[in-house]
Image: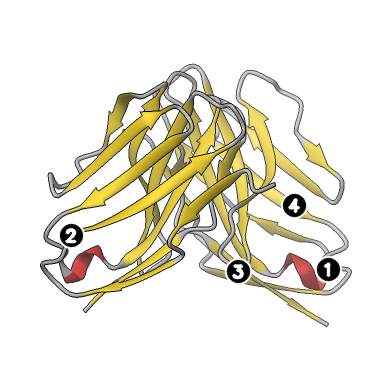
Amino acid sequence: DTAVSQTPKYLVTQMGNDKSIKCEQNLGHDTMYWYKQDSKKFLKIMFSYNNKELIINETVPNRFSPKSPDKAHLNLHINSLELGDSAVYFCAAGTSGYEQYFGPGTRLTVT
Amino acid sequence: AQTVTQSQPEMSVQEAETVTLSCTYDTSESDYYLFWYKQPPSRQMILVIRQEAYKQQNATENRFSVNFQKAAKSFSLKISDSQLGDAAMYFCASSPGNTGKLIFGQGTTLQVKP
């Protein structure tokens, strides 16, 4: 069974559109994260939720809105997509200080 | 703010040889953890090794070991008996003890030559 899954794996869309990426974990961890990996492969934390509560919001534009319906799911909704949003988005789940389990990533391409 | 620096964008090693990847970090936290993650071309992030900052003993996982120098804020990764499957991008990361977020370095691409 996949520990952390993301859908879709690839997303191609036009500027100005709104899109969502879904993430699910079956590990039972209370904390989930979203990371962005840019074209230079640099990875940066975006958000973190602990048991459905937002605990980290790292200066991400308001167009990005995470939602956690329950502690097994953390979705990322992006409004008014821009070219600079093109990146790979990783969802992760884990316990503070221990391994974070990453999803396979979603490659978002904005044209 | 916490920062992590990997000064080697690319490294190469001959199969079966040993290679060391460098990492330095800066933190004001007293409680933190350090990690090395591997990202092969499949882009899956895979944990290689983890170190608790309060432990002086260097972590080891099979062919992978670290040289943790707390005073120097250095956390290098040594890969022994390198294998072709070790070819990947390697990321050093630090994590404060309270939030668990990972702060990544820029990454080092490791090439393994047969």
Q: Which residue bears the numbered disc 1?
A: B83
- N-terminal of the pair, mark 3 or mark 4, is 3
**Point 43% across, 62% down: residue:** A8
Q: Which residue bears the numbered disc 2?
A: A18
The chain that hosts pointer 4 is B
- N-terminal of the pair, mark 1 or mark 4, is 4
Q: Which of these two is toward me, A33 or B74?
A: A33
**Point 42% across, 21% down: residue:** A51
Q: Using the rendered image, report if marks 2 and 3 lie on a common chain.
A: no
Query: Distance between the Cα atoms at labels 2 and 4?
Result: 44 Å
Query: For residue B26, what is the image quadrant?
Result: top left
The circle on residue B78 is 4
Residue B58, position in %: x, y? 75, 32
Q: Which residue bears the numbered disc 3?
A: B42
Residue reaching furthest to the bottom: B114
Query: Distance between the Cα atoms at labels 2 and 3?
Result: 27 Å
Q: Is residue A11 left or right of residue B55?
A: left
